[in-house]
Image: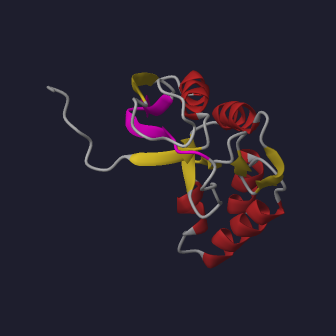
Amino acid sequence: MANKIQKITANLWFDYQAEEAAKFYTSIFKNSRINRITRYGKERHESGLEGAVMTVEYELEGQKYVALNGGPKYKFTEAISFIVHCETQEELDYYWENLSEGGDEKAQVCGWLKDKFGVSWQIVPSALNDMVSDENHEKSARVMKALLDMRTKIDMEKLRKAYEG
């Protein structure tokens, strides 16, 4: 009980892949771990499987999450996504390649992807927000046009060239 509870924790509702998803995500992010797995007891649950995984508490880069096996009632949508800020093209490529593995290729556009569980991610350069909100409207417009022309992952060099004109 000595662990301080994080004020806000994202809770992700999976059909029955909570443990698989948590293991997938913690294998990709280096500063990550699974903290606790809870199982369904004799209380009612639509799977009827006493002992099945109910929740998995895990951390990605120090941010805590909960994955819940809640059944097929709800699905993920692009209305919620996780943003991964990257400093280099190599880092961006790493997260893109790993998170998109087995995902929906049709959902890949402008740095957005949907992973194999249906969770949406934005893999972006850390400097992107500064570029698109630059006070020089010509610079920000060039960056936005270059970004929108990218059909899948972001090319940081193309964004930099657009920014510099």
Q: In this picture, is 27 found above or below 64?
A: above
Give residue 120's position: percent from left, percent from top.
Answer: 64, 51
Quadrant occupied by the C terminus? bottom right
* Direction left: furthest residue: 2
Inspect the magenta stretch and tell me whether residue 75 lies in it.
Answer: no
Residue 126 in sight here: no
Quadrant occupied by the N terminus? top left
Q: Residue at 79% x, 54% y: name it.
A: 107
On the rendered structure, is 79 left or right of 37?
Answer: right
On the rendered structure, is 61 left or right of 13?
Answer: left
Q: Nearer the viewer, residue 95 or 57?
A: 57
Q: Residue at 77% x, 47% y: name it.
A: 153
Could you tell me what secondary structure mostly forms the magenta stretch?
strand
Residue 11 in sight here: yes
Range shown magenta: 53-71
Q: In this picture, is 63 found above or below 33?
A: below
Q: In this picture, is 101 found above or below 72?
A: above
Q: Quadrant of residue 43?
A: top left
- For the image, the number of numbered tags is 0
